[in-house]
Amino acid sequence: ESESQSTFEKSEEAKEYNIAYKQLIEEYGLTNEEALAISSKVKDTDTPKNNLRQLLSTTLWKAAKHQNQEDCNLPSLEQAQINKDILSDELDALDAIFLPSELKVKHENNATNIVISITSEDNDKLIFHLDITVSDVAYPDVYPTVFITKGWNTMKNVLPGSGTAAHIETYTFLASLPKGEPMVYALYVFIQGLLQSDSDIFDETLLSR
């Protein structure tokens, strides 16, 4: 029975590993080698699904040469309310800017996930998602996690790992934004321009950093 259980656990572990590996390539635009390196770390965690994005975010901060060392202390009740009000105003502004089909907002576990669709100028069927998660009480005093998902596996004439380079540039830009101020729309404008440019940033990789 123990041997059977061990085999089952290994098969479940392999399944989680393969899911993470495939997701990193198709949804986040990483190369095979980058996905292999990160998904192997996911495999070693107790909750791989929950840790994939956190591991990727940490790796991107390092690749952007920014430690992102945040204050782990919770904000005071007064500051937490101020932050909540800033986020609420920002969500209202985003709601006024984007169509319901372009903007999705989900609140869960004291965090807010904001997903904005970005359509390619050259192909209206090629849609990327700007996927941002913020802490309800700490943002904008703490940087959000930011990902550009979808679209990478359908792009033509783009090298593997283009998503990696775009993410590195995004995290470098994010680090330049002042804390305490809304960041979502600024990120949207930056990433929209990035995806529509012919920049050579798409030669960057995580493994070369």
Image (spheres, rainbow, N blue to C red):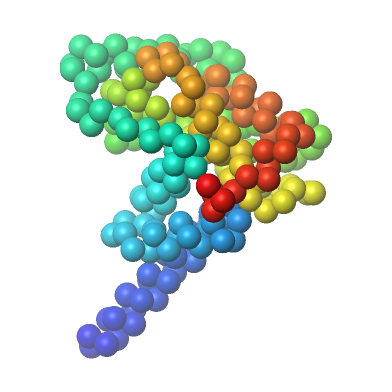
Q: Where is residue 152 in the image (x, y as percent from the top left)?
A: 66, 47
Q: Between residues 80 and 160, which one lies in front from this camera angle? A: 160
Q: Is 187 rendered above or below residue 122?
A: above
**Is 109 left, or right, of 115 in this rendering?**
left
Q: Where is residue 202 in the image (x, y as percent from the top left)?
A: 68, 42
Say whether residue 29 is visible.
no
Q: Is 161 rendered above or below residue 133?
A: below
Q: Is 27 rendered above or below residue 130?
A: below
Q: Give the residue drawn at x 39%, y 58%.
A: 42
Q: Is 179 rendered above or below residue 104?
A: above
Say whether residue 166 is visible.
yes
Q: Where is residue 16 in the image (x, y as percent from the top left)?
A: 42, 64
**Is 100 left, or right, of 194 in this rendering?**
left
Q: Give the residue drawn at x 39%, y 76%.
A: 11
Q: Position of residue 93 (x, y in %)?
A: 51, 12
Residue 190, quarter of the rendered image:
top right
Q: Between residues 166 and 203, which one lies in front from this camera angle? A: 203
Q: Give the residue drawn at x 37%, y 33%.
A: 68
Q: Give the residue drawn at x 72%, y 51%.
A: 159
Q: In which quadrant of the rendered image does the N terminus lie?
A: bottom left
Q: Between residues 45 and 92, which one lies in front from this camera angle? A: 45
Count of numbered marks:
0
